[in-house]
Image (tube, rainbow, N blue to C red):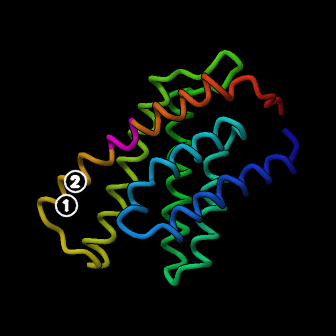
Amino acid sequence: MHKQERLILAALFGSVIFVTRVFVPPPIDKILIVVDAVLLVLGALFLRKWGATSVGAVGGLLTGLWRPTVPFSFIFVFLYGFLIDISMMVLKVKATNEGVDQNKLIISLTISTFIIALISYYFTTVIFDIITSNLLLDLLVLIISPLSGVVAGYSSSYLWNKYLRNISIEN
């Protein structure tokens, strides 16, 4: 894939992340982390090395420019992409014309989503005291974030294996 194609794909996926973060009202925007995760994974599968990080950087930059919390919007989306890239490298998730290993992708997304949820929850409740911590919210983060990762991992692998695996991605 040429540099221009990589940039266009990262910009496209990052723009959709921006839309889900900015124009969808809370708390629905938090539910759409599944959409963000799918786009980050597809970025990683298509762009390969640091693809999710690139998509996260574009999505985070656009979101950060729109919202007054510029550094945090950028950092969390960028970090989420970075975590996805790292977990996919560690688990050796590879995109091929035969498909992608569904179980490895689900595990990768579950781990990444859980980590980013814990980090963002910790920052908003403990560090900045934006949200008051309570047991129900703690449990929701601990339960919903891995479930979102499973759904995103399954959705991404299904999309890749069923519809996208035959798209030429030679570098």
For mark 2, what is the residue? Answer: 140
Q: Quadrant of residue 159?
A: top right
Answer with left or right where residue 135 lies relative to residue 102: left
Q: How many marks?
A: 2
| Amino acid at pointer 2 | Leu
Q: Main secondary structure of the magenta part?
A: helix
- Residue at 39% over, 61% down: 28
For mark 1, what is the residue? Answer: 137
- Residue at 32% over, 56% down: 118
| Region in magenta | 146-150
Quarter of the image for the C terminus: give it. top right
Question: Is residue 11 on the magenta stretch?
Answer: no
Give the crowd class for mark 1: few <14, some 14-19, many >=20 residues within 10 Å: few
| Mark pair 2, 1: CA separation | 5 Å
Find residue 42 and report its horizontal and vertical position in percent.
62, 40
Question: Is residue 147 on the magenta stretch?
Answer: yes
